[in-house]
Image (cartoon, rainbow, N blue to C red):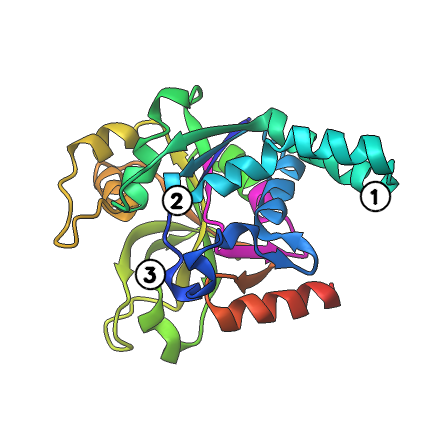
Amino acid sequence: MIKQAIIPLAGLGTRLLPLTSVFAKELLPINGKPGIEYILDECIEAGIKEVIFIISKKKLMIKKYFYNDKFYKNIIKRKKDSRIIKEYKKILKYKKMIKFVFQDKPLGTGDAVLKTRRFIKDNYFLMLLPDDLIIKHNCSKSMIATHIKFNSSVMASMKVNKNEVSRWGIYDIKKKIDNMNFIIKSVVEKPTIKQAPSTKAVIGRYILPKTIFSKLLNLKPNKGGEIHITDAIQSLINENNKFVGHNFSGKYLDCGTMKGYINSGLEIVKK
């Protein structure tokens, strides 16, 4: 079973400026609850026991959110408010399972993953990208079941409109397994409509093998100075490591843009 998850949180959040110039986007409330708590609840429900947050010094407020004990103890002592007590107990539950590592330069998701190398114990681990919220069905739980069934790495997949493929990483499918799963040949980043090998897009849920760390160590940064996780994944696929694309059943919400963030709140209210 997969017991560890990593969540890259060091990104600058430029798509949500000016809010993110002073505030961590992952703490912005969606229907009265910080976005990061939806991700943590997904992990807990999927059986994850330890979550590693990758943050930067500019995102220290995320750590403070979970380590503000003195504030809570003082206010509970004075007010004895049942709602505050309940919220504090929930935060304590989260805190027990969270570790923090730092990525002080925005050098890409691959570099963020590499920062967790010394903490990963098992052969596989889960990675969740917090801009991608999935509601109604637990995506991580179904991906773990897929991993167990096929004994492979797994990446989340969603069908997108053909005229939107240039916004996404798009799967080149090697072989269809069943209606929910397929073998990944490669990922084509933001292709034109003509170049797109399918309409299946990469969504921010991954079950990755521990062997990815050796690939990341040997990768050279791209022109923008970043190390991309997809390059390390492709290197493993080229060596015949099996990566399964999983068509998840939940509803995808994009919390990384202002329009998507507002829409996410509206969709969660409907839920």
Residue drawn at (15%, 44%), measured in percent from left and top? 221
Which mark sits nearer the N-terminus, 3 or 1? 1
Marks 3/2 in contact by CB < 8 Å: the verdict is no
The residue indicated by pointer 3 is: 169
> Taking 115 as reference, is 83 above or below it?
below
Residue drawn at (21%, 40%), measured in percent from left and top? 235
**Mark linked to residue 83:** 1
Q: Position of residue 146 (x, y in %)?
A: 53, 41
The residue indicated by pointer 2 is: 58
> Taking 96 as reference, is 270 above or below it?
below
Q: In which quarter of the image is the N terminus?
A: top right
Q: Position of residue 144 (x, y in %)?
A: 54, 37
Magenta includes 139?
A: yes
The magenta segment: 126-142
Q: Which of 231 and 63 is in front in this view?
A: 63
Q: Which amino acid does label 2 sit on?
A: Lys
Q: Where is residue 261 in the image (x, y as percent from the top left)?
A: 55, 66
Which mark sits nearer the N-terminus, 3 or 2? 2
Write down the quadrant of residue 165 in the picture. Answer: bottom left
Q: Nearer the viewer, residue 35 or 205?
A: 35
Crowding near the residue tagged with mark 1, few <14, some 14–19, many ≥20 C-alpha atoms within 10 Å: few
Distance between the Cα atoms at labels 1 and 2? 30 Å
Mark 2 lies on a secondary structure that is helix
Q: Which amino acid does label 1 sit on?
A: Arg
